[in-house]
Image (cartoon, grey):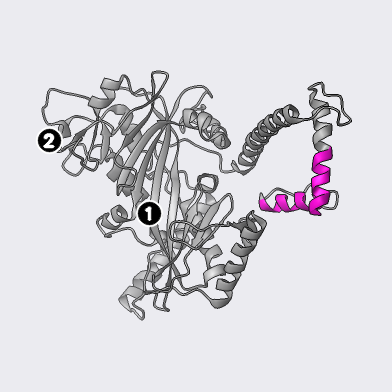
Amino acid sequence: MNTTVRVLGAFVDTLVLNIYQTRADFQVVKGRLDGELLEELKALKEKAQDDEEPAVSRFVFCGAPLLMTAKGGDGFQWILKNKLLTLAVNRSSKMQLIAQVRCSSEYLWSVRDLGKVIHEVFGFLVTIFGQRIKLQVSACDLAADVVGLHLGTISDVKRNFVTRAQLTEERPLSEDGMIDGPDGIKQRWGRITGLPFGARNGHVSALLYNKQHEIKYKSKEKEWFYDLWRVARDAETGEPLWDGEEEVWRVEMRFKRPALNEMKGEDFHGIDDAFDLEEHLPGLWAYAVGHVGGGEDGLPDGWLRYVMATEDTNRSRWPVHPDWEVIQGAFQQKEELEETAYEREEREREELLQLVDEELEARPFSTDKKKGRRPGYRIVATACPVVPESFTLKPYIRERKRQVNTRQMAAQIGGCMETIEAWRPAGDGFDVEHDLSSTFSYVFRLVEDYFEEKDRDYGQRVNKKRVVYGIDDRSSDAA
């Protein structure tokens, strides 16, 4: 059976890393913040509370400063964030965990190279906590965006999706070891928009949802995904994979720390160190959605799969739907790639290093050995599209967010203008005719008086906002 499903993109959509301090031998120890850092964080938080707005810190990640919030959260005393990541810091010396960092979807999809992400984040964190730190994977969401996926009716969904999600009294395990359908079906105007599988706080969970619907009604600032989908090309024909109108569905698999700790492979037990995560992405995805062609016994496998019903009473043997087979290959490593001069140079370098490793293994002088990652190596997908290497999402993200935020701000200002015009008294020197320009003149006088009363410099505050929001300086001095 043929399939019309095509993968527009597949990558890590959420990444949360625990930060631990270590000894010289890389063994984790109880965390203790440096005294100067502790005082700096306290002062920043006090400033944020006094000013009733985030305080700009000296910590800069990818050109944007982190802002200290007025409140902590989730057991952490200090929360610093910019548009790319959120850093939560813990002051207690009784715990080994000293901090936690969450990478934003915007940052992850902009880079689209997990090895580079980990190295950039680690390099930034050592400037705060020092060299002796360990990054442990706390949570990881893998996502694949696809077109051509048609799920059918609600009854089709309930019958054709089988999962090994966490059991409940309402959803007991069937005799064949599988659970019917999703935990619920989200709809809008009679159309399916989302299918959750497993508890959101469970060790493993999944969500299939209409990504365009989610962007339109919940995340307008993420319209930059449209720009990424538009440049996706078929690897063989070079034709665009998305026409700008067809529904895009996201298959999102979510892993928490307990599940990552239990993952097993031929040469590993558990995914702990963040630097090891990239090489295990295909294995994580295969565990979640099944291996292409089935497991070692040849039967369909996977925590969640979309199947075709047969007369067999054991649904674990029902064949995987061809549409799902494409999704299963979203994170598979390409076996055949045209080798560039750079890649050839790196391969030869890697082969030479392998010879050195073999020699060192034969004549060891150190017990600390860690498998390296070839520079420039990326986990890509056989089913994934071709995206030009020169393509960067950053300018698209900036423009999309500017458009969305500007429109939202205009809507808020418009509502405020309507309200203030309704409250505006007669006989204050203006003709009350409910004219927008007249209202703005009235508001201008009020704001000017307020700034003078508070001794605020408008230009200075605008420049401060530019720093806070990471906006390029467009002043004449910068030009």
Q: Which residue is mark 1?
A: 279
In the picture, measured across the screen, residue 370 lies left or right of residue 47, that is: left
Q: Residue type at mark 1?
A: Glu
Q: Position of residue 363 (x, y in %)?
A: 33, 79
**Residue 285 vertical placement versus 126 (above, below):** above
Residue at the outermost right position: 429
Q: Can I make out residue 178 in this image?
A: yes
**Magenta region:** 445-468
Between 272 and 455, the residue placed more toward the observer is 455
Query: Image point 29% across, 40% down: which residue?
Result: 198
Between 135 and 70, the residue placed more toward the observer is 70
- For disc 1, the neighbor class at 10 Å (few under 14, some 14 to 19, many from 20) is some
Q: Is residue 458 magenta?
A: yes
Residue 328, picture quadrant: top left
Q: Position of residue 312 (x, y in %)?
A: 11, 26
In the picture, measured across the screen, residue 30 lies left or right of residue 465, that is: left
Residue 262, picture quadrant: bottom left
**Residue 243 vertical placement versus 446 (above, below):** above
Query: Image point 72% across, 27% down: which residue?
Result: 422
Q: Earlier in the sequence, mark 2 or mark 1?
A: 2
Q: Position of residue 378 (x, y in %)?
A: 45, 50
Q: Is residue 5 magenta?
A: no
Q: Under tag 2, what secondary structure?
A: loop
Q: Position of residue 462 (x, y in %)?
A: 76, 49
**Residue 128 vertical placement versus 434 (above, below):** below
Q: Under tag 1, what secondary structure?
A: helix
**Residue 293 vertical placement versus 192 (above, below):** below
Q: Residue type at mark 2?
A: Asp
**Numbered-mark total:** 2
Q: Which mark is residue 176?
A: 2
- For disc 2, the neighbor class at 10 Å (few under 14, some 14 to 19, many from 20) is few
